[in-house]
Image (cartoon, grey):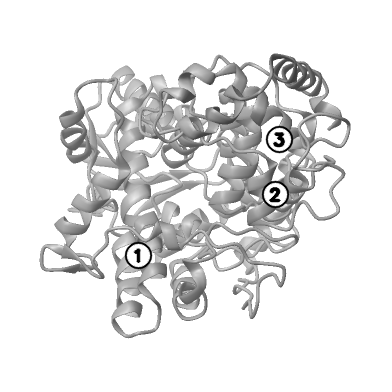
Amino acid sequence: MRHLVIILGDQLTLDNPALHGFDPTQDHIVMAEVAHESQHVWSHRQRITLFLSAMRHFANQLRAQQFPLTYFSLESHAYPDLPAIWRAVLQQHQPQAIKVCEPGDWRVWQALQAVADEHATPLQVLQDTHFMCSIDQFQRWAAKYSDKNTSLRMEFFYRGMRKKYNILMAGDAPVGGDWNYDHDNRQSLGKQGPQALVPPPVFTPDVITQAVMALVKQRFAAHPGQLEAFGWPVTRAQALSLLAHFVAEKLPQFGPYQDAMWQNTPYLWHSLLASALNLKLLNPREVIAAAEQAYACGQAPLVSVEGFIRQILGWREFVRGVYWLEMPGLKSANYFAHTRDLPGWFWTGETQMQCLSQCIGQTLQTGYAHHIQRLMVIGLFSTLAQLSPQQVSDWFLAVYVDAVEWVELPNVVGMALYANGGRFTSKPYVASGAYIQRMSNYCAGCKYDPKQKTGERACPFTTLYWAFLIKHEALLASHSRTRLMVQHITKMAADERLAISDFAEQRLQQLASL
């Protein structure tokens, strides 16, 4: 055997660079399902189902095109993890070299390199051309910020990517005159709530997916999450259908309400494309082109198209670059030295805080929550409640269908929790319950009142927010974007500050029962 080609579970595309130059007479592909990939974090059953079903569909696509493939399904072997399978295959075939596209997980890359070294087999790790900015290119861009005390800024990276790929550009200037329309995309839904919502397509499980669901119910019965409503795209054709639906039905309203939240309405105008992108069923270039075409044809306004493209071309590419720049230290980052355990209701959604009950409840039901629910409800609470960044990050990696570590870890540890001290964010994302009340109807009927700082009806978000400001007054006063926050506490009497801090400590001791 010339090349043993390893295809990982989030590399499901024929454009995989490890397949370039493939010779079926000399080369062989290996794909593997192992329980450890669902158990090193206690994964949501929909996440497990999505990965396994998409992998099996892609394996069939490879077979149909006559690629020689060895596929290890969970039912067919007893190997505990990926390294055990790789060792067995290397021992059997003795290839001249291993080829693989850059993994999306530092842990997997290190494990594969270790196995290759054990067997003295060269490992060829090929640049992942799915992404529009390579790891090396990002590192060269970041090198301009050689001082580690200087934060990397996504906005500047994003502008460079717009210019490089000529996306939403009019010559050297951005279409519309502004690079960023974020200020227009923070509207709340008002008392009337969302209007004229079109439900997303649901992809009815086929025979392959049904078999996977039965397997998951048997092998992963103790794992979190409901499986009955599974309907995520598991093939490229389904992913393209979801993209077309988003552009036609949801992109026009996406921008203004992308930060809004509403009870029992998990999807609003969000695209739901992240899992398909992260499995590589979709290419970011075709997603961006579809959105840009919608603007050119007058089907969607610039504020929505720019806001959506910024998520794909800007933030998605940026956090991947940050992940590889900052690993492995990012995994253990803990700027505030927070060490509290996750309350048990993170796994049940059974909390009296309605916003968290809604966001975690829909996560357990669907494997999905949009970015504001993740950042400004779950992430916000985790910061204010002093939860361990490593436990929070592992939870996010476990429960969301679109979670791959390269995108999950920087978003959670870096942005949501500020656990790396603002390496690429300009401020800690902290707010009181008033923010949630403004951007949602979650507070309606809740036990807690976002206007109250202390007392039994005080919203835990509000109590913990003010206590956070008091505790970190010096840090926040030094940031231009948080300086106004602490001006409010400088006017507080000493006894009021003490009362808030004492009550916040009581709340922290009661997290499990809030």
Amino acid at pointer 3: Thr
Front-lying residue, 225 or 390: 390
Q: Which of labels 1 and 2 is toward the front?
A: 1
Sequence order check: which comes first, mark 1 or mark 2? 1
Displayed quadrant of residue 454: top right
In the picture shown, does residue 503 fall above or below 202? Answer: above
Residue 386 in sight from this viewpoint: no
In the rendered structure, the answer to whether residue 513 lies left or right of residue 4 reads right
- Name the residue beneath numbered marker 1: 306
In the shown orientation, is residue 469 left or right of residue 414?
right
Instruction: Decide: is 459 above or below 168.
Output: above
Q: Residues within 10 Å of mark 1 (few under 14, many from 20)?
A: many
- The residue to which callout 2 is attached is 359
State the residue in front, 311 or 274: 311
The span from disc 1 to disc 2 (Cα, nearest Å) is: 26 Å
> What whole-number distance in Å separates the C-alpha atoms at marks 3 and 1?
33 Å
Task: Give the Cα distance between marks 2 and 3.
Answer: 18 Å
Q: Which mark is residue 462?
A: 3
Camera-nearest label, 3 or 1: 3
- Badge 2 density bin: few <14, some 14–19, many ≥20, Cα 10 Å: many
Instruction: Farthest residue to the left: give it.
Output: 171
Q: Which of the pair 471/385 is nearer the observer?
A: 471
Indicate the amino acid at tag 2: Cys
Sequence-wise, the earlier of marks 3 and 1 is: 1
Label disc, if present, on residue 376 of the rendered structure:
none
Percent position (x, y) of residue 489? 61, 25
Q: Is residue 174 above or below residue 467?
A: below
- Whichever of callouts 2 and 3 sits on the residue coming sooner in the sequence is 2
